């Protein structure tokens, strides 16, 4: 593996971070690493602040394919993306220098809006009504009409993102070794007039999912991209596929995806 020595620290401007960051930078420098100010010069990107900060770090640095991402929790709280905390940052540096790296690869969703703008998501994309009225979405799988959804919205999640918003809507937790993505409903309407599957469903990585929004008052639906949300006018079609991109992170020994799921939820 190519030597990786340039570290960029990503963090939100929360009170108290600066002092702790200085200690981390000193520790990195004393272990032979270079701390850089520009993420484009880095081959290691370290987020500080939990899973939310990790998602932001990946998005703000454009889903880099040529570097390793690492997540540090500030207070030892459980995290699905963060293997390290402030107390074991030195262990991470030692792993980087002296041990055979165990690299975890997180799948990424590719989203296209109306044949134009492209977005990537590590957790999920959600499409929701922006007003107090149900949204109507025609769901196509490989250009074949599957169902017409009516309700609050739909979530499309990666396997690693299945433990987030998706899980809170009773979606399944999916092993990240399975190349797929999952579609879950938000408060669907099911009666004699409207009918949907009524449960989440999982699509193989080679499937193409198209969500076609009916313009019946929801002219500014909300698009959720991981932990960011946008209100975009007159969206017609949202196409979702599993990208060839993967986010690479360093994995601690004996800390598998299912270890983290157990630690977080059980």
Image: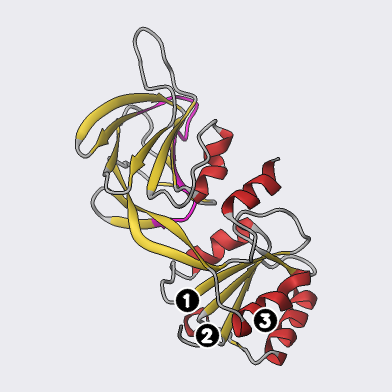
How far is disc 3 from disc 1 in space, using C-alphas?
Answer: 18 Å
Instruction: Residue 48: give x, y in percent of width and height.
Output: 67, 67
| Nearer to me, 184 or 228 | 184
Q: Quadrant of residue 142?
A: top left
Residue ID for mark 3: 94
Q: Residue at x 44, y 26 (%)?
A: 199
Q: Dividing the image into 4 quarters, which one contains the C terminus?
A: top right
Bounds of the magenta span? 120-136
Identify the secondary structure beneath mark 2: loop
Mark 2 to mark 3: distance in Å?
Answer: 13 Å
Instruction: Indicate which disc, 2 or 3, sits on the residue closer to the N terminus.
Output: 2
Taking 68 as reference, is 82 above or below it? above
Earlier sequence position, callout 3 versus callout 1: 1
Q: Does residue 46 appear in the picture of this structure? A: yes
Q: Residues within 10 Å of mark 2 (few under 14, many from 20)?
A: some
Looking at the rendered structure, the secondary structure element under dot 1 is loop
**Tag 3 near tag 1, CB within 8 Å:** no
Q: Position of residue 107 (x, y in %)?
A: 43, 56
Between label 3 and label 1, give the one nearer the viewer.
3
Contact flag, marks 1 and 2 (Cβ < 8 Å): yes
Residue 121 on the magenta segment = yes
Residue where numbered disc 1 is placed: 67
What percent of the width, then of the height, locates residue 16?
80, 69
Q: Residue at x 47, y 35 (%)?
A: 130
Residue at the spot of label 2: 4
């Amino acid at each position: 593996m190519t030597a990786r020595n340039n570290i960029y620290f990503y963090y939100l401007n929360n009170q108290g971070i600066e002092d702790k960051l200085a200690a981390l930078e000193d520790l990195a420098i004393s272990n032979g690493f270079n701390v850089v100010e520009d993420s484009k010069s880095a081959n290691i990107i370290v987020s500080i602040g939990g899973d939310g900060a990790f998602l932001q770090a990946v998005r703000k640095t454009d889903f880099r394919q040529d570097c390793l991402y690492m997540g540090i929790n500030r207070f030892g709280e459980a995290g699905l993306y963060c293997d390290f905390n402030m107390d074991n940052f030195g262990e991470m540096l030692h792993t980087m220098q002296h041990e055979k790296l165990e690299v975890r690869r997180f799948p990424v969703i590719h989203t296209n809006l109306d044949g134009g703008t492209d977005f990537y998501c590590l957790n999920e994309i959600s499409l929701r009504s922006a007003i107090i009225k149900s949204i109507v979405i025609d769901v196509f799988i490989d250009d074949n009409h599957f169902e017409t959804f009516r309700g609050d919205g739909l979530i499309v999640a990666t396997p690693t993102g299945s433990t987030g918003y998706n899980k809170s809507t009773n979606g399944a937790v999916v092993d990240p070794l399975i190349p797929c993505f999952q579609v879950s409903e938000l408060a669907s309407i099911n009666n004699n007039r409207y009918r949907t599957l009524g449960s989440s469903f999982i699509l193989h990585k080679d499937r193409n999912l198209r969500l076609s929004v009916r313009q019946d008052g929801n002219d500014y639906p909300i698009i959720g991209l991981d932990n960011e949300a946008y209100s975009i006018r007159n969206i017609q079609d949202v196409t979702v596929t599993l990208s060839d991109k993967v986010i690479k992170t360093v994995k601690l020994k004996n800390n598998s995806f299912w270890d983290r799921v157990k630690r977080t939820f059980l």
